[in-house]
Image: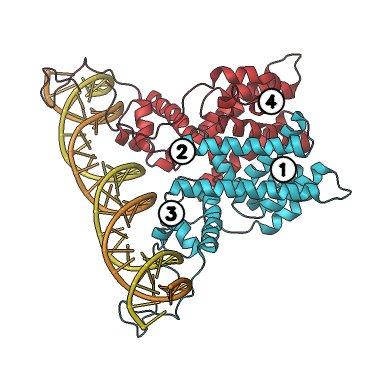
Chain colours: A red, B cyan, C yellow, D orange
Amino acid sequence: MSDATASSTSRVGPPTTRMGSDARRELVLEAATSVFGQRGYAGTTTDQVAAAAGVSQPYVVRIFGTKENLFLAVLKRALDLLLTAFRAALADESEIPVGRRLSLAYVDLLTDRGLLLSLMHGFVLGADPEIGRVARCGFLDVYRFLKNEAGFSPVEAAEFLAHGMLMNTLVGLRMTDDYDKDADARELLEGALQSKLALLLEVTNSPAVSNSPAVSTSTAS
Amino acid sequence: MSDATASSTSRVGPPTTRMGSDARRELVLEAATSVFGQRGYAGTTTDQVAAAAGVSQPYVVRIFGTKENLFLAVLKRALDLLLTAFRAALADESEIPVGRRLSLAYVDLLTDRGLLLSLMHGFVLGADPEIGRVARCGFLDVYRFLKNEAGFSPVEAAEFLAHGMLMNTLVGLRMTDDYDKDADARELLEGALQSKLALLLEVTNSPAVSNSPAVSTSTAS
DNA sequence: GAATGTTGTAATCGAATGATTACTTAATTC
DNA sequence: GAATTAAGTAATCATTCGATTACAACATTC
C-alpha cells in the first residue's frame, strides 16, 4: 500500500475502467477453474479465487451466490468446453482416425491447467447431493457423445474414457514433475501418453501449491 | 443422552473396557478411510472421523498429530493393502490369467468403501507438497509392481492402470446409483466392468453424504 | 495398594472462512 | 447534468474446525 498523497478514502491510481459483468464472470470462472483444479472443492477458498481473479472476495460470492454454485458453474463450463472441443475435432475432416483426433483434442485441453482437474475433483465427489448429480450427468454426456456422435461402441467408449481418467490422474499427481528424476515415471508417462506426451510436458511447469494464506480481499494494485 | 441417576461427572454405563492403542489406531484408520473416501481430504473434518470411529475428536488428533498426518497414514495403509492384495492374487496359482486375477482383486478392494477413493483423492492433490509426494510415490510403486512382479509391459501396465482409474472414477461418481434409472449408465458400467460388475453392485448401496454437522466430540453411548 | 503410565474425554481457544452489510464510484439514461 | 443503475470494495460477523490444555478413569508394576 503506497502512502501517497491520497487521503484514507480517496483513489490512489488512475480511475479504474469497469468491466462488463459477463466478462468479469468469465474471468472469475477461469481463475476458479485453476484454483479448484489445484486444491479441490473443499480445499479452495473463495478468497483464493478472488485473489487469482484480481477482485475482492465478497464480489466473487456476490456473482455466484455461494461457493458451491461457483464450483458447479466451473464444472458446467468445463464440460461444455470439453464437448465443444470434441465436436470441433470430430468435424475437422482429416486423414487421422477419429479416436486419435479426439485424444489429441483431449490432451490439448489438459494444457488448460485446472479444466480437467476440476472435473476430476467433481467426479470423486459423487456422494455430494448437488455436485454428484451434475458430475454424473456430465460424465454420461461425454459417454453419450462418444457413442452417439463419434460412433464408438460401448466398449470402445469405456476404453477411451479409461485412458482419459489415467491422463487426468497423472496430471493431478503432477507425475510430470518426476519426468526428469525417475526412470519409471518417465516410462509410465510415455506408455500412457505416447505421442501426446511432448505436448503435455510443455505446459507442466508451474510450482506446487503454497500453503501461505492469500493476502485476501485486497486487489493487487 | 439418558438422564439416568448419574450426577454430572459420574459414569453412566458399565465401566468401559479399554482398547490397545494399536487396535484403536487401526479402527480410527478404517473410519478415516471411509470418510476421506466420501468427502476428500479438505472436505473431511477430524470430528467426522472421530464420530465414525466412536472416539472423541481430540483423541483422533492426538493419535496422529495432525489431520494431514492422518490422511497420509490412510494413503499409506491403502497402498499397502492394495499391493498386498495384488501379491496374494499373483501368488494364488490358478488357470485364470494374471491380468484377470489382478482385476478381480482390484474390484474386491473397491468393495471396501473408501479405500480406493481415498487414494483417488490423494492422486488429484499432487500439487500439495507432502500429499503429492506420497501419492506419486505410491502410484509408481503400483506401476513397478505391475512391471517387475506381474510381468506387464509398460503399455500393458498403463492399460491396466487406466481401467483402474476409470473404475475408481465410476465408484467416486456413484454411477451405480443410476444403474436402475439410466440405460446409458447401465451400459457404461457394463462396458467398463464387464464380468466384475455384479460384485460391485452388491456393495454400492449406502446413502449420499449428509450435510448436517456431526454431533461432534461426544461419543455415541 | 500406592505409584505410575496409558487410554480417553470435556472444555475451550484462535485462526480461517463463507457470507452479509454498508458504502463508493463509474456508467447510463432521461 | 441530475438521477439511477451497475460494478466493486472495506469492514465485519457467525461458524466451523484443528489443535491445546487440563483432567478423569483404567491398567500395570513394584
Q: Residues within 10 Å of mark 1 (few under 14, many from 20)?
A: many
Residue position for label 2: A71
Q: Residues within 10 Å of mark 3 (few under 14, many from 20)?
A: many
Q: Residue D13's x, y, as percent?
A: 22, 49
> What residue lies at 71% left-to-right and 29% top-to-bottom?
A149
Q: Quadrant of residue D8?
A: top left
Q: Is residue B174 visible?
A: no
Residue position for label 1: B188
Q: Nearer the viewer, mark 3 or mark 2?
A: 3
Q: Residues within 10 Å of mark 4 (few under 14, many from 20)?
A: some
Distance from disc 4 to disc 2, alpha carbons, whole Å, reads 35 Å
Q: Helix or strand or loop: what does disc 2 sit on?
A: helix
Q: Quadrant of the N terminus of chain A?
A: top left
Question: Looking at numbered disc 1 in the image, what kind of residue is underneath it?
Answer: Leu
Q: Quadrant of the C terminus of chain A?
A: top left
> What residue lies at 64% left-to-right and 44% top-to-bottom?
B168
